[in-house]
Image: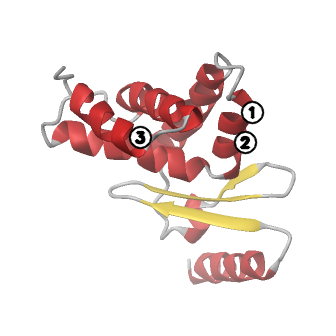
Amino acid sequence: MKLLHLSAAITAATISLIPSLHVRALATEPNYLCFFKTNSGKVVDLSDSVCQGKKSTDGTKNAKAFIEAYKSQAMKYSDVRDNLISSIQSSPEEKIQQAKGVCTDLKAGLSMDEIEEDQADENVERASRINASIVNNLATKYFCQDVSMNN
């Protein structure tokens, strides 16, 4: 068991020293999603070895499904499609956190209309408004199915 932890520590240290890899980690309770993205765009899940041994199987599946659904929704907006796709490819964890933030707001008692109204004040450019709309709609499907919608 100690050898496994040592191996994981060495792997993590090696990865952090390789300049061609972009290491990204996202930790949320109770699931930990830990991955790195190579220059070729491949995402490698290191939950078992790097993130304290807590693998987020459901979280990983939901995150991947959310990202694919986001890309699919973004394709409907030809004028901002490239911007939206580029944004989620370069920082998928940012969109996931936005979606989880929507869930937090819904659980706190805000309605989707109230959330969208707050976002409209912040987002004046079209790509930002469309991004918020896509994230809001997908959040309840992938990250907080248990929240009832109060419109």
Disc nearest the viewer among 3 and 2: 2
Q: Considering the image in quadrants, where does the C terminus appear? A: top left
Marked residue nearer the N-terminal end (3 or 2): 2
Amino acid at pointer 3: Ala
Residue 78 or residue 45, whichever sits in front: 78
Residue farthest to the top, as pictured: 76
Residue at x-position 65% and y-position 28%:
71
Q: Is residue 57 above or below residue 114?
A: below
Confirm or deny contact between disc 1 and disc 2 (CB under 8 A): yes
Residue 57 or residue 117, whichever sits in front: 117
Residue 38 appears in the rendering: yes
Amino acid at pointer 2: Ser
Residue at x-position 60% and y-position 47%:
92
Residue at x-position 68% and y-position 29%:
80
Say which element carries label 2.
Answer: helix
- Residue topped by disc 3: 99
Give the mark count. Answer: 3
Say which element carries label 1.
Answer: helix
- Residue topped by disc 1: 82
55 horizontally vs 6: left or right: left
Give residue 106's position: percent from left, percent from top.
22, 36
